[in-house]
Image: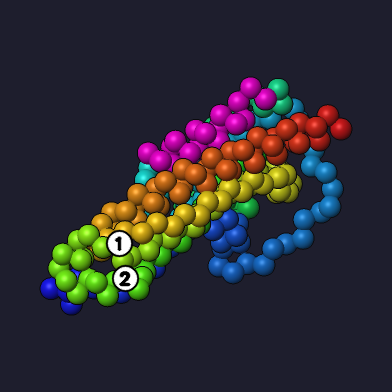
Amino acid sequence: CSALWLGGDTRQGNSSSLVDFLYPDGQKPAGVPERMPYLQLPIRVGIAFVPGKSYQAIPADEQELLLQRVANAFRDRPYVSAIEVIPDSYLRTAKGFQGMSQVAAMFNVDVMALVSYDQLALSEERDSSLLYWTIVGALVVKGNTNEVQTMIDTAVFDVSSTKLLFRAPGTHRDTENATLMDASRDLRNLRSNSYTMATDDMIVNLNHQLEQFREAVKR
């Protein structure tokens, strides 16, 4: 029985790469002129998820909740006139800055806030996993260590100049012990919670960046 139960270490990762989206097929970044972008205030903001490598690595309902939290950070800002939450399906076939500009034109927005994520989950056996050689031990001994590291990042671009205005990252790392039987379920819960905690951290940083942007707009 223990031979069937013991699966060794497992490593899982999900990500949506902003670099891969903006520079598909190994394109090299072009030089961006070192000049201040001209923004006609108030601006219209589009918010979208960068498509992931695996389809809907973050469940659709969690994506919607995350994007709404990003949208709420932009609400009631005097320099923002409208906010459009854009489904990631529009970005799956429109890649690169040209694709971003096409989507922005479709939704009539001046600025795009692109949300990306990166999560690594690891489940490995501890020394106490030797006790798994009894069936009861496999059920009650917390011989597995689950670890999750998550980053959520919001990058805000001026569409016309393709210049990065600012970015707001959020990170979270957590570790817990689990029994072999519960390791998979506990890892799923740990990953879901890590997305939430990383988002909380990102929202704090986003609000800070938006305040700094407000001061820049004054100047």
Question: Residue 145 at what x, y percent from top left?
Answer: 37, 63
Q: Earlier in the sequence, mark 1 or mark 2?
A: 2
User: Is residue 168 left or right of 193 when viewed as pictured?
Assistant: right
Q: Is residue 215 above or below residue 119?
A: above
In reply to whether residue 63 is colored magenta, the answer given is: yes
Identify the image quadrant of residue 215.
Answer: top right
Residue drawn at the location 30% of the way across and 74% of the way down: 8
Q: Is residue 103 visible?
A: no
Quarter the C terminus occupies:
top right
Residue identified by numbered label 1: 142
Residue identified by numbered label 2: 128
Q: Is residue 175 visible?
A: yes
Q: Look at label 1 and name its amino acid.
A: Lys
* Predominant SS along the magenta part: helix
Stretch of the chain drawn in magenta: 61-77
Question: Residue 196 at what x, y percent from top left?
Answer: 46, 43
User: Is residue 138 left or right of 97 when viewed as pictured?
Assistant: left
Q: Is residue 189 above or below residue 106?
A: below
Mark 2 residue element:
helix
Residue extending furthest toward the right: 219
